[in-house]
Amino acid sequence: MASEKRVSGEPPSGAARQRWTSSRWAQLTPQAVPVLLVVLFALTVLLFFPFRFAFELDPDEGIQLMKAFLHAAGHPLYSQVYSDQPPLFTLLLSSLIKAFGAKVLPARLAVLFFSIILLTSAAEHLRQMWSWKHSAAAVVLLVLVPTYAQLSVSVMVGLPAISLAMLSVLFLTLWHKRPRPYWLVLSALALAASVMVKLFTVVLVPALVAGLLAIPRPNGAEVGGWRGGSRGRAASLWSAVFVGMLGILVTGLVGLPQIGQLVETHLGVRGIAYFEAETLLRHTRDLWPVFLLALIGTAFSVRRKAWPTLYFAAWVVLGGVLLAVSTPVWYHQPLLVAAPACVLAGVAVIEPLRGVPWRARGRWGAKLLALGVWGTLGVYLLWAGPRFIGKLRADMPNLQAGASPQTREFDLLTLIEYFDPDGGFLITDRPMFAFRSRREIPPELANLSQKVLRSGVVSEQRIIDLIRTSESPLVLLARFELPEVEDYLGSRYDQVYGYVELRLFVKP
C-alpha cells in the first residue's frame, strides 16, 4: 500500500483526515473545560439567581447608580457630586444610563461581564502555566466563594476592579512566556484602569514591578532588547505606562483639587468604635480551607519554578496586609484576597495527582500531602457547595413572563409616585428609591453611607439644611437612624408610611 504523504502543516485526506480530526478534537476538548465552566456559571446566575427581580442587592448599588444618574443629568463628579471612589465605574454606569435609561438591569449585567473577565483571566493564567485541570479547579473554587455569585451581579466597584487586576496579571504572564512589549503596555493599562475603579488594587504595583525585575526568562537567557526579555527595560516600560496613564486619569477625570475626596472618608473613620467589629478575620474565617490550599499551591509553584504564579501569592499577602490595617472591612472587600488565593488553591488541588506512585511503596509524605489536600478540598466543597445552591431558585420566570415582584420597597415606589406624580426632588438616605423613581437627590447625599455619616463629611444638620432649602415635597428615611432629622420632619411634614426602617414623609 502506498504510504500517504502530505505537506507539513496541512491536514491529511480521507480516513487519515478523520483520524487527524478526531485526535485534534480530543486535544481541544479538555482545554475548553474551564471556558465551559465559566459559561455554565454565567448561565446559572442569569437563569436562577434572583438578581433580575431584586429591588436592591446592597445599599451601595443605589449609591453607585445615583452618582451615575446625576452625572448623566449634567452634574460633574467631585465638584458637585460627592464621591469617595475613583471615577471610571461611575462613568461606565453613566454611559449605560444614557443608552438604556435609568434601569438597574443593564448595570448588573455589566458587572456580570466583569465577573466573566475575572474567571477567564484566572483560568487562562493557569492554563498557560500549568494545565486545563488546574484552570478548571480554580474556577470551581472561585465561584463557590460565598459572596461571589452576589457580587457578580451587584452594582459595586470591588469586583470590576479585581477583574481588571486579574487581567493585568494575565497580560504579564503572557509576556513572561512570549516577551513582546504590547503585553507590558496592556498590563499597565489594565491595572491603571483597575485602580481608577477602586483604589485598593494599587497594592499590586510593587508585586508586579518586583516580578518583572526578578523572574528569569524560561530558558535562563538574558538578552538585551524587548524580544530577549530584558527585565530592566520591561519594568521601566510597565512603570512608565502605568504612572503615565494613572496621572492622565487622575488629572483629567478627578482633578487635583478634589483628589482628597478619594481618601478622606476612608481615613476619617479610623478609631471609631462603631466599625471595630468589621475586620478581615471576621469575613474570611470560613475560607481557611482556601487559604491553606493557597499556601500549598505557593509551595508547588516554587518547586516547579512556575514563577509568574507567585504574583498571586504576593497579591494575597499585600492585599491581606492592606485589609488587616483598614477599618472597616465589609463583606465584599475580602474578595481582594480570596480571588488570588483560589488561583493558588487550584494548583494545590491538581498537583498531588501528578507524580505520586500510589501503588508503589515509599513516598508516604507525598501521599499524605495529597490526602490532606483532598480532605481540605472536601471540607470546603461540603461547606460552600450547599450555600451556593441555596442561593439559586428553580422557580425563576425565565421562559415565560413572571409576575412583578411584590415587596415593601416596590410598594413604596408606588406611594412615591402617588404623592408626587410630577417626579420632583426626593431627599432620601437610600438612593435606590430615587433612582428607580427617576428622581434626583441633592448631589451631596448621593454617596451617603455609614462612613460618610460617622466621619462627619455629611452631618444630620446638613441634611436638615438640604431639606429646608430644597423644599422637597417628599423625604424618605429608609436606612439610617437620624433622630435630629426625624424631629425636624415631625413638625413640618406628615408621615404617610412607616414600617421598620422605611419612613415616608410628605410636605402638607
Image: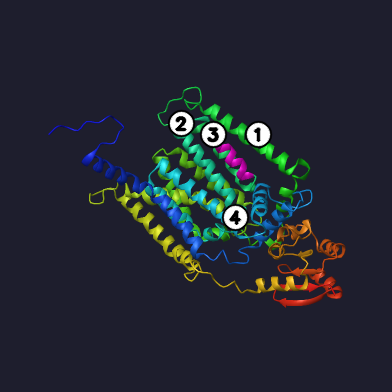
- Residue 72 in the image: state x and y as whole percent: 72, 52
- Cα separation, mark 2 vs mark 1, equals 26 Å
Give the number of the mark in front: 1 or 4. Answer: 1
Please give the label number shown on residue 184: 3
- Cα separation, mark 4 vs mark 3, equals 27 Å
Give the number of the mark in front: 2 or 1. Answer: 1
Does 185 lie within the magenta span?
yes
Which amino acid type corresponds to the residue marked 2 in the rendered image? Pro
The magenta stretch is: 183-195
Of labels 1 and 4, earlier in sequence is: 1
> SS of the residue at dot 3?
helix
- Residue 404 in the image: state x and y as whole percent: 59, 71
Which amino acid type corresponds to the residue marked 4 in the rendered image? Gln
Which residue in the rendered view is the most extreme toward the top?
A: 224
- Cα separation, mark 2 vs mark 3, equals 16 Å
| Pick the front one: 13 or 118 | 13
- Residue placed under numbered mark 2 in the picture: 216
Q: Residue at x 54, y 27 (%)?
A: 232
Of labels 4 and 3, earlier in sequence is: 3
Q: Residue at x 71, y 49 (%)?
A: 263
Q: Is residue 337 left or right of residue 303?
A: right
Label 2 close to label 1 by CB (< 8 Å) = no
Residue 467 appears in which quarter of the rendering? Answer: bottom right
Of labels 3 and 1, earlier in sequence is: 3
- Residue 271 in the image: state x and y as whole percent: 71, 56
- Residue placed under numbered mark 1 in the picture: 244
Q: Residues within 10 Å of mark 1 (few under 14, many from 20)?
A: some
Q: Is residue 39 left or right of residue 30?
A: right
- Residue placed under numbered mark 4 in the picture: 333
| Pick the front one: 383 or 154 | 154
